[in-house]
Amino acid sequence: MRKKSTILTFFLLPIFLISCIQEEELDTDADILEAYIPPQYLKTDPIITNNSIEFRVKSNIDLKNQAPIFILSPNATIDPVNGTLRDYSTTQTAVVTAQDKRWKKVYTISFNIDELSTSYAFNQAELTDKDRYYRFYSIGSNGDKIYDWASGNSGYVTVAGDKTPDEYPTTVDKGRNGGYAAKMQTVYTSSFAAATGNPIAAGNLFLGSFKTNLFNTLKSTKFGLPYAGELPKSVRAYYKYKAGKEVRDQDFKVIPGAVDSFDIYAIIFESQAKENYLYGDHDFKDPRNVAIARVPKTDRLETSNWREINFPFKLVEGKKFDPTKEYVLAIVMSSSIDGAYFTGAIGSTLIVDEVELIYN
């Protein structure tokens, strides 16, 4: 009897092990990787975050009859299924389920026909990504939320541990006239990130989108959203700033004599069919650039009280602005001017409110 039991166990054990391996190999990712609608309706590439998809579209689109297609994580499924015709005059939701059926993610899907705003007060913010951090929004003409502003917070999640939303690089503070203001602070990442040359994370906020690129972090930020209108005269904003004590480089070594500074700038650049944005490594040299406005060094002052700054747009040499053409506007703010290169002072803090394009 024992011999038969041993033989049976001998034959059944491999089957049991194979079954376990197969269960372990089931995919657990439930992400939307890409999103598509007919390209003639798009103003720019779809904006994909960890839990939302936004199509910025032209006004001639029929919002009540759209059937977007989504590329998902391997073996994941989506409900409703790809190509389902739906009314997107208001935001819809879709549920992505991983192959293992245990992991699910709810995405909001919106179509935005509104033109880009020319002023922002940052009074509307919400916790997102399981209440880990804040993101700012405005309300569109149809009552839906519009997420013009992005930050690197979703990348910081990987090293944040049990940090609270107020400890993330980009968060909220008291506004100049009540409500919220945008607060950006330069923080330490982690010992692991520091060992790979990423010791600090500067708080940032910009028009555009963010998607983590582990192989080239400067490709994570995508600056700019479609812009329609005249060439602005300048950018006006109100800010507070306090520099951290020691500026450190990518190796987390103190740079003797260095003093940290904030940065705020805007770029208007020519639109193109694909990759209609600037990456974080643009260095103001992209050939599409038409006009640039940047806070001059003499105006990057420390202040504990609200201070107004108004800095002009200047045409790039050899370029002219044609209001009949399509352009993209990027506005970028950072608590450390070299934060994109993981250089800055921990504790540097920039608070900004009431950013506005000035036309006359």
Image (cartoon, grey):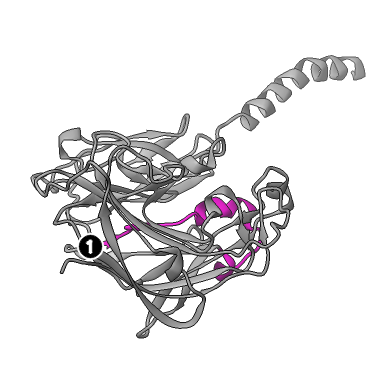
Region in magenta: 145-168
Q: Position of residue 13 (x, y in %)?
A: 77, 21
Residue 178's image quarter? bottom left
For the N terminus, the quadrant is: top right
Q: Position of residue 297 (x, y in %)?
A: 45, 64
**Residue 137 in the image: above or below residue 277:** below
Q: Nearer the viewer, residue 226 or 243?
A: 243
Q: Position of residue 222 (x, y in %)?
A: 39, 45
Residue drawn at x 47%, y 43% as measured from the top left: 220
Residue drawn at x 64%, y 64% as measured from the top left: 346
Is 150 one of the magenta-colored residues? yes
Residue drawn at x 67%, y 45% as measured from the top left: 197
Q: Position of residue 276 (x, y in %)?
A: 29, 40
Image position of 90 (left or right of 282): left
Q: Is residue 131 visible?
A: no
Which secondary structure, mark 1?
A: loop
> Could you tell me the amino acid type at mark 1?
Ser
Residue drawn at x 62%, y 31% as measured from the top left: 23
Which residue of the protein is positioned furthest toward the right in this rendering? 2
Is 295 one of the magenta-colored residues? no
Q: Nearer the viewer, residue 159 or 98?
A: 159
Image position of 203 (left or right of 199): left
Q: Is residue 336 visible?
A: yes
Residue 147's image quarter? bottom left
**Residue 347 in the image: above or below residue 111:** below
**Residue 325 in the image: above or below residue 187:** above
Image position of 118 (left or right of 280): left
Q: Which residue is mark 1?
A: 117
Q: Nearer the viewer, residue 331 or 301?
A: 301
For the C terminus, the quadrant is: bottom left
